[in-house]
Amino acid sequence: MGFKPIPTLVALALALVIWFIPVPEGVSAQAWHLLALFVGIIAAIIGKAMPIGAVAIIAMTLVALLGITVPEVNPETGKAIANPAAQAAKDALSSLNNTLIWMIGVAIMISRGLLKTGLGTRFGYMFIAIWGKRTLGVAYSLVISDLVLAPVTPSNTARGGAIVHPVMRAIAASFGSDPENGTEGKIGKYLALVNYHANIISCMLFITATAPNPLVVKLIAEATHSNISISWGTWFTAMVVPGLVAMILMPLILFWLYTPEIKQTPNATELAKEKLKEMGPMTRNEWIMLGIFGLLLVLWAGIPAMIFGKAAEVDATTTTFIGLSLLLLTGVLTWDDVLKEKSAWDTVIWFAALVMMATFLNKLGLIGWFSGVLGSSISGLGLNWVAGCGLLTLAYIYSHYMFASGTAHVTAMLGAFYAAGLALGAPPMLYALVLAASTSIMMSLTHYASGSSPVIYGSGYVTMTEWWKAGFIMSVVEIIIFATVGVMWWKVLGYW
């Protein structure tokens, strides 16, 4: 049998219950049925009814077979869809054309080059030689690495998944922590979670650290008729204090949650130095890998566009393909290496399925309806603006369980929630900053919450249950930090 009966029955039951619930007013039957399917698929993934890639294939098949994404008439022409079955199949596979998904997959492939050449291992030993006396020291080295790169790396997928993650894997491997050998608990599980949450907290600190942040600024400016226009400096000044508090506490909290077996490594620095001596000088392939790595960093940071103007801008996904192409041309990686990177291909499939369903939930109007109902319901409770905006913010953050893209979430919900908060009487700048911070906090929740999560989760160090538990706890911690330290800091700055 290719599936586990109990988790499968639970997922099927959840999907059928939602499917046959009377469709709420203001929601199309298509949107409601897609929600039922989405909930069932997520339940199957959580329950491990089948491998996640297999569940994704079934999800795509059901979307194509049921035709729940295809409207009865073309909204542009007002005429019936000529071939609804073909359109349904096209919709089911639509996210395989998503540039972010391919960037994630190719980033995983590139990370194999760091492992194959030994450059990642060399980096790992260098980190250990400096901070390796304690596991916490290694964790904070990953934090600093992501934080330093964040201002100039607009793609948090590139930063956390393609730059820092291979180094983290090399460090874990140097301590004999490998999920394939069942030794992830030694140190790898802990470092993988630090790798991810450092990436998310970095997104809070800089407008340029992740793609949704500029969109947040744009939507807030539009909602206030440009009365509030958050600059790079204003954003950083507002976020730096609560953000750094969160960054300092995060490795300690995760250490308590998932205590690594290796806590102190008093001989690690000497061992790392010996290993570096054994490795000798860098090889040809290491130098090539380092050069390509540097080129990718320059392009991801948008430095050519800064110097030569917009004409020299290179898309982040194109940059990733340039890196893989150069690795193939130079022989650092072979096509067999790429084909053997199963986690990359697996991630492309399952992430595409989740993005596709989340995208059509938005297109079919379910997210807009949900935002409007929630906003008006909270507004109608007669609460003061503090309590009302608190509920709005929690709803905004935890609705991200339905999203596989921060940009899609911001596009669908931020404008409606910001308007609802202002209607309750919230100070405009204060609530703008609350939603800006919340946009990063929500990305801590799931293994599909942002572009970097499938890369780090896909390496296998952390189970889904552990990932979701850590994500929820960190979201609560970050909410508390921003609701106390953040709000007080913003008062000092005169933002409310």
Image (cartoon, rainbow, N blue to C red):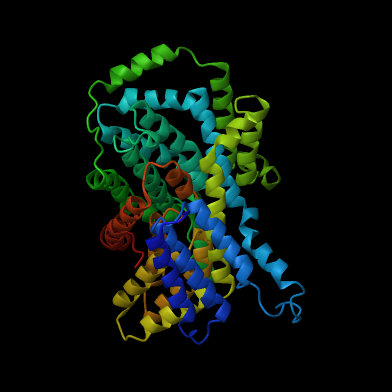
Residue displayed at 37% across by 79% down? 425
- Coordinates of residue 65 in the picture (x, y in percent): 63, 68
Query: Does residue 173 sit above or below 236 in this rendering?
Result: above
- Coordinates of residue 277 in the picture (x, y in percent): 40, 12
Observer-nearest of 41 and 219:
41
Residue displayed at 51% across by 42% down? 343
Observer-nearest of 259 and 183:
183
Residue displayed at 26% across by 45% down? 258
Query: Does residue 270 sit above or below 212 in this rendering?
Result: above
- Coordinates of residue 371 in the picture (x, y in percent): 46, 76
Residue 355 sits in quarter:
bottom right
Residue 89 sits in quarter:
bottom right
Query: Does residue 187 sit above or below 408 in this rendering?
Result: above
**Taking the image as drawn, is residue 453 in sight?**
yes
**Taking the image as drawn, is residue 227 in sight?**
no
Q: In this image, 171 relative to 115: left or right?
A: left
- Coordinates of residue 449 in the picture (x, y in percent): 45, 56
Q: In this image, 122 relative to 132: left or right?
A: right
Q: Quadrant of the C terminus?
A: bottom left
